[in-house]
Amino acid sequence: MGKIECEKSLNMKLSVIRILHRFLPVSIFVITIIVFWRHQYPLPSDAVLLLWFSRLDPLLLLAEWRNTGSLPEWFWLPLILIGITMLFGRLFCGWICPVGGLLAQIPSRQHNIDLLYKGRYIWLALVLLVLISGSNWALILTPFHIFTEEFTRMWQGKIPWVLGGMLLTSTLFYPRFWCNNICPTGLLLASLSRIRLFRLFVNNECSNCMVCTKGCHSVAINPSERTISEDCMLCLRCMRNCPKGEIKLSRLEKAKVTSYEMMLSRRQFFKGGVVLTVAGATWPLLTSASSIGVIRPPGAVPETEFLMLCSRCGRCLKVCPAECLVPMPIEYGFTAFLTPRIIPRQAKCELCMLCQEVCPTGAINKVPLEKVKMGTAYLDNKKCLVYTEQKICLLCREQCPAHAIEVDDRDRPYVNSNLCLGCGGCEKGCPLSEAAIVVQPNKDSWRYKDEN
Amino acid sequence: MDRREFIKIATYASISTLVLPGCSSQKPLTQQTSELQTKQAASGTVGELIIVEGNEPEQLLKRGFDTLGGIENFIKKGNTVVIKANFSVPRLPEEGCTTNPNLVAGLVKMCKAAGAKEVKVIDHPFNNPIICLEKSGIKKAVTEVGGTVYALNSSLERYFGTAKVNGKALWEIDYSKDVLEADVFINMPILKHNYATDVSIGLKNLMGLVWDRGYFHKSDLHLCIAELAAFKKPNLTIIDAIRGITSNGPTGPGPVKDYNQIIFSTDPVAADAYASTLFGKKPAKVDYIRLAAELGVGQLDWEKLNVKRV
């Protein structure tokens, strides 16, 4: 077989890959949006796809493992991803990630911010530390979580600042700026990708024409040093673009591993140590969670734990058919920011429990209806029309799905707190301008019935 | 000014509007009632009350309409028909808290076959409308037979128009536009328990055509229901008494009872009166039925009607 034929077949393969790369990440982006959109009542069975997409992320596995102390049944999925990354590099970032699918549409530019780039593994270490210490706050930056959080914001008619910033920095600096500097999943995979077995190389015959660098979305190629960094996402644009065909995929020789800067230099290590110490000092700000007296979704774990576990992905807000779940504003402090709460007077919980189905972190547990206890209703006899004006109102009793409103021998309502779920139907239903019956959230320590 | 003071002043102000010329329009009511009365006077005959026994919804409907002389007596070609069903709570059909979906769909089908241009099935659920429409099975059943079905919750402007009732308890309300504009209005309630009024049947079902029901509970609930019925009488009432809850109403779930019948009547009061006896109540003891009869909406003593059991 002649050399020309060989090149021809390679070119064929490359153009197939090019078409694939044009459509696959975009399709995954579109599919994710569709599945996210289908997070509504009644929940279609394909909505579970988003949960499984999220489970690709090794960071979610880490969070789950730290939370439950055992490996979930889907542990093999992120492990496969880790394996693939150690073999081929950031295939996930380049081919599967929906955020990547979006950012891949941005025209290529090459402005790396050195300071950020050098500090990125320290940033990753910080994120990992937050995660391991128990706060799932960090997960909001991972692709599937930031994706749904931002689209929930858009769905609620708010401005998706992070998505906007992501697109802006990508346009100003380079398409994969977010992926290489901020995305913790991307950085984790990049760090694993440093030891990848199969990688792209720049051959020695390279004439330093720099055509390859212009097309690279990830600023991963350094032709003068003949290296392609761990940020390579295997789009193979450089292979297609190289006029001399000097970029090749090949197995890493053992000898090269040592010469390749595998480990952090001592200076980097030292710097990192200093930053982490400073971070440690500001620690309580990031991870401490104080209990806030609000009503949480049905099945939510106790308040302190809830604040730690919730990743603020916003999927419960999207799926709630009653739109009774609302994100908490920043006024309640950083630790509660964006976590879902219920304001019964605005909308009551319909107890459809779909929020439990879509929660990726276990902040909203799968708790059967019989055990749900979001709070307890308290009736103010001094306001209630039945007591003050002897009306036959009983709207609270009509509304209560738990039959927790009972009446005395004079047909006056009172709350049976054992039966009350705290859904807020009574508070919403009360016809007074200021409800005579109000749901109070439970004490911090318990959220389910039969506890305490 | 504190709240009590405000309410006092507001009450005086609203009472004064009754006296001041131009503030309240008495005319529409008189027209409405006189129209009703002339209609009744013109028909002159004794009303009919048809009790159809069984539990096959479509058959029950067919037998009922056959006894009434055919659905064509009610629905003319090109009519717009509005059916007020009850899907106000998120319960499954077998839980007996919402109108039987096959019954509703069966009626839609018959209306269509009789030449109705459009058949709308409506309610104003006091729970989440999406879940109610889905769980009650009414959305699926009605859509399948070509009817339109929707909840009135989403928009006051779109679904409600101001209506003058000019009663003692109700003056002016936001009432369903669909019903006001319909050629034929059929009330299709379910017989079930209700904490506030003991039993919920046809007249109580009409509350689902009003935007602000909190007001009913704040003022005189029974009188409001009666005056609402006097304001707009359905052309036909078909009560779903196949199965209904006997306690824990209206939301349920609760103990169910199979009555295995549906009730047809052009007299909404008589229909409710008979149904209340099924529930174990004396009609006169259910305040809103008695009050509606006193307002001339219909006959409290249902046995005076031409009763047929089929």
Image (cartoon, rainbow, N blue to C red):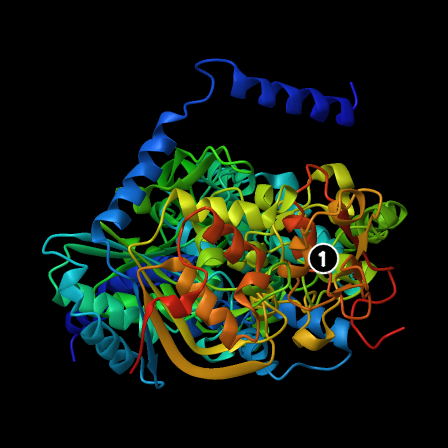
| Residue furthest out toward the top | B21
Q: Residue at x 63, y 60 (%)?
A: A398
Determine whether A76 is above or below A303 in the image: below
Image location of residue B109, percent across then percent down: 20, 69
Where the C terminus of chain B falls, by quadrant? bottom left
Task: Identify the image quadrant of the N terminus of chain B.
Answer: top right
Q: Which residue is mark 1?
A: A296
Q: Is residue A37 above or below residue B107?
A: above
Determine the chain carrying the residue at label 1.
Answer: A
Residue type at tag 1: Arg
Which residue is drawn at the image coordinates 28% and 50% (left, top)? Answer: B40
B215 vs B114, left or right, is right
How many badges with numbers are in the image? 1
Residue drawn at x 27%, y 65% as measured from the top left:
B143
Q: Residue at x 21, y 65 (%)?
A: A11
Please name whichever residue, B28 or A189, is drawn nearer the observer in this view of the structure.
B28
Report whether residue A425 is seen: yes
Where residue A293 appears, x then y in whole percent?
82, 50
Residue A402 occupies quadrant:
bottom right
Q: Position of residue B285 (x, y in %)?
A: 59, 63
Q: Nearer the viewer, residue A118 or B34?
A: B34
Instruction: Please name whichever residue, B108 or B61, is drawn nearer the observer in this view of the structure.
Output: B61
- Specify the quadrant of the image occupied by residue A296: bottom right
Quadrant housing residue B49: bottom left
